[in-house]
Amino acid sequence: MRKMGNLEFRILQLLRKNPFLTQEEVADIIGISRSSVAGHILNLQKKGYIKGKGYIFSSGNYVVTVGASNIDITSYASNELFKKDSNPGKTKYTLGGVARNVAHNIAMLKNESYLISVFGDDSNGKRLFRETQLAGVDLGHAHKLNDERTSTYHSIIDSNGEIQITAVSDMAILNKLTPELLNKSKSLIERAGILVIDCNLTRDALEWLFRHSGNVPIFVNPVSTHKAGIIRHWLPYIHTIRPNRLEAETISGIKINSIKEVQSVTSWFHEQGVQRVILSMGAEGVYYSELDYVSGHLPALPVNIVNTMGSGDAMMAGLVHCALVGMDFQESVQFAQQCAAHVLETELTYSLTLSSFAVEKLLALL
């Protein structure tokens, strides 16, 4: 199948949500003519996304997320941190990992969520597996590996909720998530509504996913400046990317000092073939851009920040959810920003209270 355009993507998601929508109703929702809708549906049929006149879809309305599952070891300083000294505070051991967090939040938003990851046979791995399943994530395609140490991520958080000094990740087990293991889930991946990838994966694993996912829309979380550059070669395969400022600079090679540079960076991503860019800029909010459609800036939400880790994962989950239900892109970014706010206000890197109802209730207050 060939790659979808943005309007085709939105129409497909709307019809998945409600196959009984008329072309006139779809046209009203999106804001285009009925004849344009008819043309896009015909193109979707020609490309193999829709089979026949009864809107039989060639892919499912579920999400597959591939990447890291960690135990997060987070130390919170009670006061200002003093380097090379003992600081009072507390330490917590919680579920984490970019892909796992995204899959968890997608499930909390009542979407069918599959996670492909690797777990060790130690106590951390058993806890991760059990509690992730309890959150509603399908782990039927995850892998428990004997004699392997489950991934961990250790960070020190200051009294403002920001990572201080350097976080340490022990993620060697992800090297075991090989193309051979991924190939066991080839059918699941090829039929997904959306594929989410985090850049903790090896180059070989990333290459396999980009080459073997058919034309499933791919959403990418670059993870860190250290790992972001790994996907530069694969940008034409990516539908949606959600970098922060430093990750966007690393991938594009363009320094961001103002909104003008942000616009240059998102334009650069579009030139490489990326359909949607959501650039997180911390206290300066979010800049978003969709190829040939809309772009804009949303200021940061006023929240009581406890921990900045995991907020980007929640934002990605919100974007995925909105794409599945065919929501307008601009509204999707607003929804996703509220998802991120849920996590910013907790010590966890995911939300225990996230729901579409809770997010929509907050949006109604804006």
Image (spheres, helix red, strand yellow):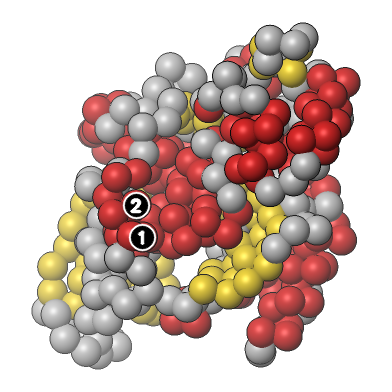
Residue 134 sits in quarter: top left
244 and 33: which is toward the camera: 33
Q: Is residue 125 visible?
A: no
* Vertical position of residue 314 compared to residue 175: above or below: below
Counting from the top left corner in percent of width and height, residue 354 is at 29, 47
Which quadrant would the N terminus be assigned to in this image? top right
Amino acid type of the residue tagged 2 in the rendering: Glu
Mark 2 element type: helix
Residue drawn at 41 percent across, 39 percent down: 106
Relative to residue 281, is residue 44 drawn left or right?
Answer: right
Residue 45 sits in quarter: top right
Q: Which residue is mark 1?
A: 363
Residue drawn at 46 percent across, 56 percent down: 336
In the image, which disc is placed on residue 360? 2
* Vertical position of residue 152 compared to residue 122: above or below: below
Asked if marks 2 and 1 touch (Cβ < 8 Å), the reply is: yes
Q: CA distance from mark 2 to mark 1?
A: 5 Å
Amino acid type of the residue tagged 1 in the rendering: Leu
Q: Is residue 2 visible?
A: yes
* Vertical position of residue 130 compared to residue 351: above or below: above
Q: How many labels sit on residues?
A: 2
Label 1 crowd (10 A; few <14 / some 14-19 / many >=20): some
Counting from the top left corner in percent of width and height, residue 296 is at 63, 72
Residue drawn at 52 percent across, 49 percent down: 319
